[in-house]
Image (cartoon, grey):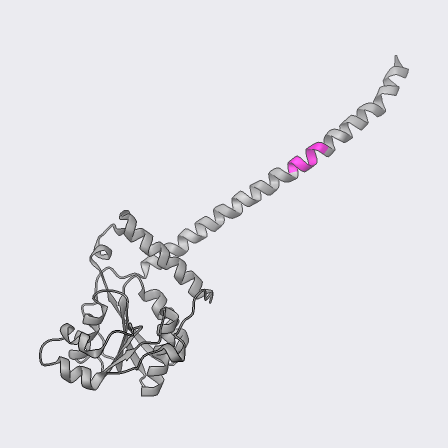
Amino acid sequence: MSLSNGALAPRRAEKDTEAERIRRPRTLLRRAVTLVVLAAGLAGVAGLACFLVFTAQIATREPSSVKKADAIVVLTGGATRIPDALTLLADGHGRRLLITGVNPATSPDMLRESLPEGDADRLIACCVDLGHKALNTLGNAIEAAEWTRSQRFRSILVVTSSWHMPRAMLELERALPEVEFVPYPVVSTRMQAEQWWRDPPTLKLVLKEFLKYVMAAAKIRPAQAVAAPGAQARVGP
């Protein structure tokens, strides 16, 4: 009986070794899957935290008082951005206004409807410049930087939608680190809602803007920023 047990011992050791070889890759696979799940979870938590920080920068009310600046820059895109910027100019919050990212078909005559009668001709003739070169927010910053430096302005009142303001300020401050920027967020009705995140279209808009902000922060440039020189229209009234 002892001889039989002695003969079986090596076989059992071989089986144990083979079983260990099978278990080892499975253990490594489980650990790898666990690490991937943990990494994905941490990335999700970090992403959510960054999104909450981003949304905290979005104004839900327009400023009650506005600091004066040397000039005003408005980034086209929202329906009320240009009228608000023209009103700020008429009220003396800046000496000159740049409307950047204007459609080449837009002319100064089309802006007159946004100003009180009597002020339109005077302001457009003396103080409004149209920038047709910018194709996106980075292009707005490039165009605004060229204009600001040519005019030697030291402070700029920035007018754009509240949800767009964080990215606009990021690009402008990069392009003009020596200039002071004063934000004037234009707040739409849907952004004024106390629980705007419950509205799917608004949440989708903000999420999309957050992704663009992250790409801008990482200097990922998927699109052309400014129009080719031969394609841009005349700047100014």
Tell me if residue 152 can be seen. no
Residue 12 in percent (x, y) is at 80, 23
Image height of 41 relative to 210, above or below: above
Residue for point 45% across, 66% down: 221
Residue 118 in percent (x, y) is at 9, 81
Residue for point 53% across, 48% down: 39
Residue 81 in percent (x, y) is at 23, 68
Which secondary structure dominates the residues rendered in magenta?
helix
Residue for point 85% across, 25% down: 10
Quadrant of the image occupied by residue 178: bottom left
Quadrant of the image occupied by residue 116: bottom left
* Number of marks: 0
Residue 158 in percent (x, y) is at 28, 73
Image height of 143 relative to 185, above or below: below
Position of 160 with respect to 43 (left or right) is left
The quarter of the image holding the N terminus is top right
Image height of 25 relative to 214, above or below: above
Image height of 169 relative to 15, above or below: below
Q: Please provide the residue range marked out in magenta.
A: 22-27
Q: Is residue 23 magenta?
A: yes
Position of 24 with respect to 187 (left or right) is right
Considering every residue shown, the one lying at the far left of the view is: 117
The quarter of the image holding the C terminus is bottom left
Considering every residue shown, the one lying at the far top of the view is: 1
225 and 90: which is toward the camera: 225
Residue for point 40% across, 53% down: 49
